[in-house]
Amino acid sequence: MNIYKEMWGISNILDRIKTQYASEIFVEQLKFQVEQLSFFYDFLVKKQGNDPSKTFYRPKKRPKEHQIAYFNLTRGFPKELYDAHWCYVFKDFGCKLLIIPTTSVKEDSKPCNPNYEMDIHIKNFPNGKTSRLHIDDIRVVDLQRLIVDKGIYDIETDRNDINVFLQNH
């Protein structure tokens, strides 16, 4: 495969759809992901014994279950939440986390859709707004998507209430 030729073809497609899709942001997110892959293979693998299967990203801080943290989800398809979002950590699998992306509830936000959304409250959250879980975008992510410097916050909403909501949907 000629990577340069393939990237040229991708560039042509992005240029064609740029009026309907934020192609520049897609390229920024692709660059971020490639840089993260380089960090993993060029730095972490070498530092941890040269075996990618035994190499793990260990952030200086990591969220616990029932906390919220900031993750770069990168670009996805148009109906998915993408780019960086605060996400509720539902389950910790070691090097991966089961997360539920959130959005801020603003004055002009649509009402919560009880089929796949739940509003939660976060302790001492900087914007002070209610956050909305989007279980329709639940996913497992690698810890390397975590943006540690944004902080990690505790959830005020009872964990059992969130669990019951998820079990019923």
Image (spheres, grey):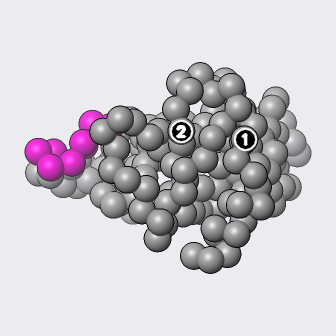
Kindly identify which numbered label has been placed on residue 130: 2
At x 81% / y 32%, what residue is drawn? 61
First of labels 2, 1 by sequence position = 2
Quadrant of the rendered image containing residue 42: top right
Quadrant of the rendered image containing residue 138: bottom right
Please state the total of marks drawn on the protein image: 2
Q: Bounds of the magenta span?
A: 18-25
Asked whether disc 2 touches disc 1, contact meaning CB atoms under 8 Å apart, the reply is no
Q: CA distance from mark 2 to mark 1?
A: 11 Å
Hey, what amino acid is under mark 2? Thr
Foreground pick, 147 / 100: 100
Foreground pick, 76 / 126: 126
Find residue 45 and report its horizontal and vertical position in percent: 78, 44
At x 63% / y 41%, what residue is drawn? 121
Find residue 108 and report its horizontal and vertical position in percent: 30, 39
At x 33% / y 60%, what residue is drawn? 79
Q: Mark 2 packing: few (<14 Cα in 10 Å), some, or many (20+)?
A: some
- Report if residue 143 is visible in the image: no
Q: Does residue 44 appear left or right of residue 135 in this picture?
A: right
Quarter containing the C terminus: bottom right
Find residue 65 and report its horizontal and vertical position in percent: 79, 51
Kindly identify which numbered label has been placed on residue 86: none
Residue 115 painted magenta: no
Q: Is residue 125 above or below residue 95?
A: above
Foreground pick, 106 / 73: 106
Q: Does residue 84 appear left or right of residue 6 in this picture?
A: right
Magenta residues: mostly which secondary structure?
loop
Quickly name the residue at label 1: 156
Quarter containing the N terminus: bottom left
Indicate the secondary structure of the residue bearing disc 1.
loop
At x 44% / y 40%, what residue is drawn? 105
Find residue 147 and report its horizontal and vertical position in percent: 63, 33
